[in-house]
């Protein structure tokens, strides 16, 4: 069985097991918490891919698949992140938001030249922020007029900026975004260098932003900061230090579904079990899963 067949079988099998009985809602896994998955992607192989990309999926992760995954894991809501391989065509994500407006929010990818009308239309569809996936890309020059205008339009909409970049780059990327007055969300533990673990100087710089009030960090995609037992130890140690520096109120959890490039190594259920290990206190998990994302991703409006 090749990788394509395996991934398609994996997703199809998961969907069949995930679907609740017709007319019945899934039992909540977190009583009293409208739990939010703050990081997931939806796509199909039929969609046009961006010309510049690091990865191309060979399976579908459809809107129906994602909603079924939320149900199976007792998650009330989800945040869809535009995947980098779809570029700035946010159409499929927007179609998902329109299918489940009470359950879903979106983070779009746009060129900095995007017009205010385009951004307002996305906001009306349920988009609440922009993503900067800078892996393999140079640092933007946030001081240019085009970027200053882009960030100003995002601020006017009340949007956040989500950053995926190696930890070593965060010390220079985050300050101009914070200065622009937009909430900043850092993906995947700050993308610590797997070879360095928590000794990564960039991770130390990220911890320094905990003293301010404008940065949030996602406890997500732990397999992207290390594999095997070493990776698990890095994630546990990083979560402990992030809790100490940022507090539960500025941490988030995301499934990273469907775990692109790590499809056979991860699952949302495992990511939730990891969260229990990283954040042993139930009250703090309630904040991370429910209170903070409800406000930050504007589910409370």
Image (tube, helix red, strand yellow):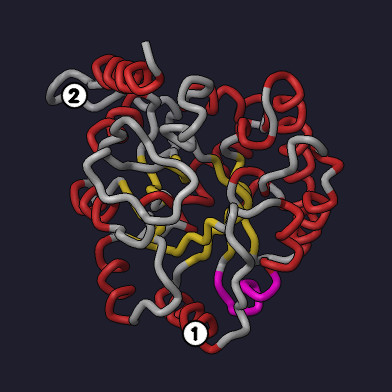
- Report helix, strand or loop for mark 2: loop
Query: Whole-percent x and y of residue 224?
Result: 62, 36
* Region in magenta: 175-182
Left or right of residue 140, residue 105 in this image: left
Residue drawn at (67%, 67%) of the image: 174
Neighbourhood count class around disc 2 (C-alpha, 10 Å): few under 14, some 14–19, many 20 upward: few
Residue placed at 44% from the left, 63% from the top? 129
Foreground: disc 2 or disc 1: 1
Mark nearer the N terminus (2 vs 1): 2
Q: CA distance from mark 2 to mark 1?
A: 49 Å
Magenta stretch, main secondary structure, is: helix
Whether pointer 2 and pointer 1 mark residues with C-beta atoms closer than 8 Å, the reply is no
- Location of the N terminus by quadrant is top left
Locate residue 244 relative to residue 79 in the image: left or right: right
Judge left or right: residue 12 versus residue 186: left
Left or right: where does residue 18 sit relative to residue 202? Answer: left
* Disc 2: which residue: 24
Residue toward you, 294 or 283: 294
Does residue 192 belong to the magenta stretch? no
Count neighbours of disc 1 (C-alpha within 10 A) and say few if under 14, some if 14 to 19, many if 20 or more.
some
Outermost residue on the left side: it is: 23
Nearer the observer, 189 or 146: 146
Front one among 261 and 22 = 261
Quarter of image, res 285? top right
Residue at the spot of label 1: 146
Name the quarter where the C terminus is drawn. bottom left
């Amino acid at each position: 069985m090749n990788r394509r067949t395996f991934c398609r079988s994996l997703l199809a099998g998961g969907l069949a097991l995930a679907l609740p009985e017709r007319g019945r809602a899934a039992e909540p896994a977190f009583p009293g918490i409208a739990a939010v998955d703050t990081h997931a992607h939806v796509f199909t192989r039929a969609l046009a891919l961006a010309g510049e990309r690091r990865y191309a999926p060979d399976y579908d992760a459809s809107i129906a698949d994602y909603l079924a995954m939320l149900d199976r894991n007792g998650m009330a809501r989800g945040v869809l992140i535009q995947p980098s391989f779809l570029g700035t065509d946010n159409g499929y994500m927007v179609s998902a938001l329109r299918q489940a407006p009470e359950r879903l929010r979106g983070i779009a990818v746009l060129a900095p030249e995007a017009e205010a009308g385009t951004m307002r239309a996305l906001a009306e569809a349920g988009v609440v922020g922009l993503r900067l996936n800078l892996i393999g890309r140079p640092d933007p020059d946030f001081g240019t007029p085009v970027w200053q205008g882009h960030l100003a339009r995002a601020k006017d909409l009340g949007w956040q900026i989500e950053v995926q970049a190696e930890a070593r780059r965060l010390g220079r990327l985050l300050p101009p975004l914070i200065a622009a007055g937009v909430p900043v969300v850092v993906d995947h533990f700050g993308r610590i260098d797997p070879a360095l673990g928590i000794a990564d100087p960039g991770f130390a710089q990220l911890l320094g932003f905990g003293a301010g009030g404008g940065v949030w960090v996602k406890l997500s995609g732990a397999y992207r900061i290390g594999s095997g037992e070493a990776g698990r130890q890095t994630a546990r140690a990083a979560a402990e230090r992030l809790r100490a520096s940022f507090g539960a109120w500025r941490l988030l959890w995301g499934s990273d579904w469907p775990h692109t490039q790590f499809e056979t190594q991860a699952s949302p259920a495992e990511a939730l079990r990891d969260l229990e290990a990283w954040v042993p206190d139930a009250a703090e998990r309630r904040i991370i899963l429910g209170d903070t994302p409800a406000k930050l991703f504007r589910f409370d409006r």
